[in-house]
Image: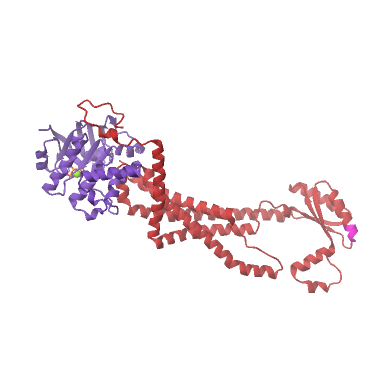
Chain colours: A red, B purple
Amino acid sequence: MTRSQPPSRDSAPPRRGARTHQITAEGRSRAWRRHHRQMALDSLGRLRRRPLSTLLTMLAIAIAMVLPATLWLALGSAQLLDANLDDSARMTLYLDQGLSESQAMAVAERARAEAGVAGTELITAAAGLAEFQQRLGMEDALAMIDDNPLPATVLVQPQSRDPQAAQALAERLGAIDGVEEARLDMAWLERLRQLGELGRRIVLVFGVLFGLGVLLVVGNTIRLAVESRREEIEVVTLIGATHAFVRRPFLYVGAWYGLGGGLLALALLTLGRGWLSAPINAIAQSFGSRFELPGIGPGGSLLLLLVSTLLGLIGAWLAVGRHLAEIRPR
Amino acid sequence: MIEFEHVGKRYGGRFEALADVGFAVERGEMVFLTGHSGAGKSSVLRLLMLLERPSRGRISVAGHDITRLHVSQIPFYRRQIGVVYQNHQLLHDRSIFDNVALPLIIRGAAPQEARNRVHAALDRVGLLHREKALPIELSGGEQQRVGIARAVVARPALLLADEPTGNLDPQLSADIMRLFEDFNRVGTTVLLASHDLALIARLRHRVLRLREGRLVADEEAA
Ligand SMILES: Nc1ncnc2c1ncn2[C@@H]1O[C@H](COP(=O)(O)OP(=O)(O)OP(=O)(O)O)[C@@H](O)[C@H]1O
Ligand SMILES: [Mg+2]
């Protein structure tokens, strides 16, 4: 602003103001990057100088992140999050007891020809029994039964997922000779879907609550940091530091807290998974099946780190913002 | 350089710290602001630094009305002014060098240029050899000189000082004042608040005298 001043009317002493920095746009952006780099390292150094309190803050963030993440994973493993329930939209045709294998095949063929059917799969009585035995691990018990009590079944994959169309199709398929009953488990499907919706909402509520928790943890920690550097903030503000300049070191501290908390949360999730997987595998094995506990995966890990870092950043922003508002001129 | 027109300042809506103050300081002048304790000297300087807004009247600096300056512009305005405080306001966990470099870092000066300027400023106040020391390792007078080096390191057109010799003995006070005169001689406008009447009388600069928030005398340089 001194530069825009017309020459002063008295004997014009050398104008020192005119020599104050003429910083080019390039120089300014270089300075800006330099300050960012400095503050990133400086704030990291500050955190490392207080390892215990840093660790405790990060741990608090981690715990707040682990709970919703675990819920999310649990829901995913129950496949309730999977909106794609195609497999469960199948119909089952129970064929008349005592049909020969070729007769059953003919019925499946007829069902396949019906309009609105995308595909069929025949499970003969013998195959059904074998699968049943294997699933329940009761081969011995069932081997004693002479007659196969199971009917042959045909799994039908309808083209449409519309409940009314599926209902009509089920009625037509039920009328085919040799079909005892066509069962369409719409009620079960609907219930599953609603359960999934409930699960999603629970995750959302917990996610928001624990996210707020992270904001509070970071916000409060940064508030204390601001408090302890109040003098410094006042001095640099007095000599012309912008709000962004004052805010920068604290934003980095907040981001580091968030990132550290996120990494700890990932470690906790991995640890927990390892700890639970042995007993769960044992249980699954006793049922003759294999079950893999779902992991968070690279995409999920990245998302978790991103969210926790962002929460740290926002918490810091709010804490510093409050202080900056206090020291503006009245 | 500085112009006050009918400036009033009330604190808390009742107490009138300044009433109808009007004066002008030309570019390149050196002016003392004096008056009893509570007369309003610091208030004048705080208004100039935009630490406070006036309740009434108009203040312009270098031809710009600063009373309506937007908050986001205040940092850039403050960079045009160097300020020296009685309690020097140094950062105690930073070296002398870092303290003096602060205004340059805020402006984003290149490291090499910053180093040169800090050395030049410390050299001006005779403390180049103490650049690595911490503020507490320095005497009161030395700390005050560091404060002055920080105020001038970015070569501001206007230098403000609030009781810069408040805690110092007469000899040190005279030294400090000589520094201000040096900066004034090379073109910096200087406004100094002080109640050290003996010192002011000796230095023969223009004096603005406040009493209970009013400007009661404007004595031209002898
Ligand atoms: N923030 C404030 N709130 C209320 N009153 C204030 C505030 N700041 C200053 N005052 C009052 O305004 C008056 C002028 O204060 P100011 O600090 O300008 O005086 P001064 O001339 O600098 O005095 P000193 O020589 O003691 O430093 C004083 O009576 C003081 O009590
Ligand atoms: Mg004062």
* Horizontal and vertical percent position of residue B202: 9, 39
Magenta stretch: dominant secondary structure:
helix
Quarter of the picture holding the C terminus of chain A: top left
In reply to whether residue A102 is colored magenta, the answer given is yes
Relative to B108, B133 lies left or right: left
* Horizontal and vertical percent position of residue A260: 47, 57
Relative to A206, B110 lies left or right: left
Residue B40, visible in the rendered structure: no
Residue at image location 61% in from the left, 66% down from the top: A277
State which quadrant residue A178 falls in.
bottom right
The vertical placement of B63 against A157, above or below, is above
Residue A263, visible in the rendered structure: yes
State which quadrant residue B181 falls in.
top left
The vertical placement of B100 against A66, above or below, is above
Residue at image location 82% in from the left, 72% down from the top: A143
* Horizontal and vertical percent position of residue A189: 71, 54
Nearest the eye: B47 or A274: A274
Magenta-drawn segment: A100-104
